[in-house]
């Protein structure tokens, strides 16, 4: 019954999910009309986000009930610390951001709100709570990128083309599929109706905070316009 918890969460939190994955930031990015300043601001905050995401994976290692769960989270932690943060620094450099810029960026309230919400959900709850709080991040980007990839590919030289391809590519789509299956496994036999309601609220809140993250970048760029 809980085999596809993700589908149930999306359905239950439908307006929250839609507001996140079809946010103006995403639409403008897809159309090649995102202001450069908005993407640059996003990249700097996303570097800080990824550091907190690594902490969330470390917490997931601790919250694992089986060695298999602990190992899966350990691999995700290693991937973010050893590979993805480095790729992010390289992408940011292409947008004119130095490692020093990334290190010194003050964490925006929207970044703090989202990342600490996820970490608290995991600390106060179990691995399922943590994975549900992370689902909009891990699965949302896969869905967004797959949806906008065609539009982006139709514009050669699209400014965020490489960024979209990273998430739309086979490798990341497979990671997302595995995360979706893992959600289903964790939920197996664990879903009383009140527990499901609780997870739906958690998921909806994480969607709102993801949408807030996009909005933060649009607002920051609008503020800088002459
Ligand atoms: C605000 C924000 N939300 C989600 C992602 C996407 N993301 C971050 S870590 C990760 C899993 C493995 O890479 C994914 C998909 C992001 N970059 N920034």
Image: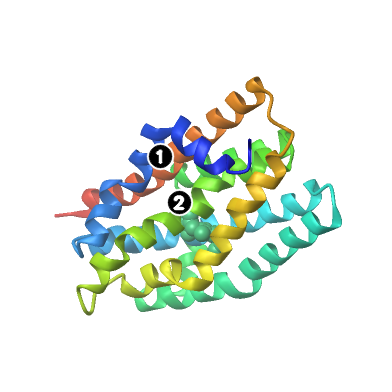
Residue drawn at 58 percent across, 43 percent down = 4
Q: Find residue 28 and report its horizontal and vertical position in percent.
A: 22, 56
Q: Is disc 2 in contact with disc 1, using a CB cutoff of under 8 Å? A: yes
Q: Is residue 211 visible?
A: yes
Q: Is residue 172 left or right of residue 92?
A: right
* Residue under pointer 2: 140
Q: Find residue 209 and report its horizontal and vertical position in percent.
A: 45, 40
**Crowd tier of the residue under label 2, counting other residues whose Cα lies within 10 Å: few below 14, some 14–19, many 20 or above:** some
Q: Which mark is residue 92?
A: none
Q: Nearer the viewer, residue 170 or 105?
A: 170
Question: From this viewpoint, which residue is outermost toward the top?
Answer: 194
Q: Which mark is residue 17?
A: 1
Residue drawn at 63 percent across, 43 percent down = 3
Q: Is mark 1 within 8 Å of ligand 1?
A: no
Q: Find residue 213 and report its horizontal and vertical position in percent.
A: 40, 47
Secondary structure type for disc 1: helix
Residue drawn at 50 percent across, 51 percent down = 137
Q: CA distance from mark 2 to mark 1?
A: 8 Å
Q: Is residue 90 above or below residue 114?
A: below
Q: How many marks?
A: 2
Q: Find residue 96 and report its horizontal and vertical position in percent.
A: 35, 75
Q: Nearer the viewer, residue 180 or 141?
A: 180
Q: Quadrant of residue 124?
A: top right
Q: Is residue 106 visible?
A: no
Q: Is mark 2 within 8 Å of ligand 1?
A: yes
Residue drawn at 58 percent across, 24 percent down = 197
Q: Quadrant of residue 143?
A: bottom left
């Amino acid at each position: 019954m809980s085999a596809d918890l993700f589908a149930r969460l999306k359905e239950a939190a439908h307006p929250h999910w839609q507001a996140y994955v079809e946010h103006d930031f995403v639409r403008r990015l897809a159309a090649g009309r995102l202001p450069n300043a908005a993407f640059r601001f996003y990249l700097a905050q996303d570097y800080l986000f990824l550091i907190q995401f690594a902490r969330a994976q470390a917490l997931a290692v601790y919250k694992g009930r089986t060695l298999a769960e602990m190992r899966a989270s350990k691999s995700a932690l290693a991937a973010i610390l050893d590979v993805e943060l480095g790729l992010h620094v390289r992408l940011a450099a292409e947008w004119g951001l130095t490692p020093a810029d990334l290190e010194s960026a003050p964490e925006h309230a929207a970044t703090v709100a989202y990342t600490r919400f996820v970490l608290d959900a995991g600390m106060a709850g179990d691995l399922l709570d943590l994975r549900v709080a992370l689902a909009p991040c891990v699965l949302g980007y896969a869905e967004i990128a797959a949806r906008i990839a065609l539009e982006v590919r139709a514009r050669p030289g699209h400014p965020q083309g490489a960024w979209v391809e990273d998430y739309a590519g086979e490798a990341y789509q497979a990671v997302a599929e595995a995360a979706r299956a893992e959600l289903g496994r964790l939920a197996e036999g664990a879903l009383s109706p009140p527990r499901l309601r609780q997870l739906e609220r958690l998921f909806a809140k994480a969607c709102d905070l993801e949408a807030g993250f996009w909005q933060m970048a649009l607002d920051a760029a609008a503020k800088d316009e002459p």
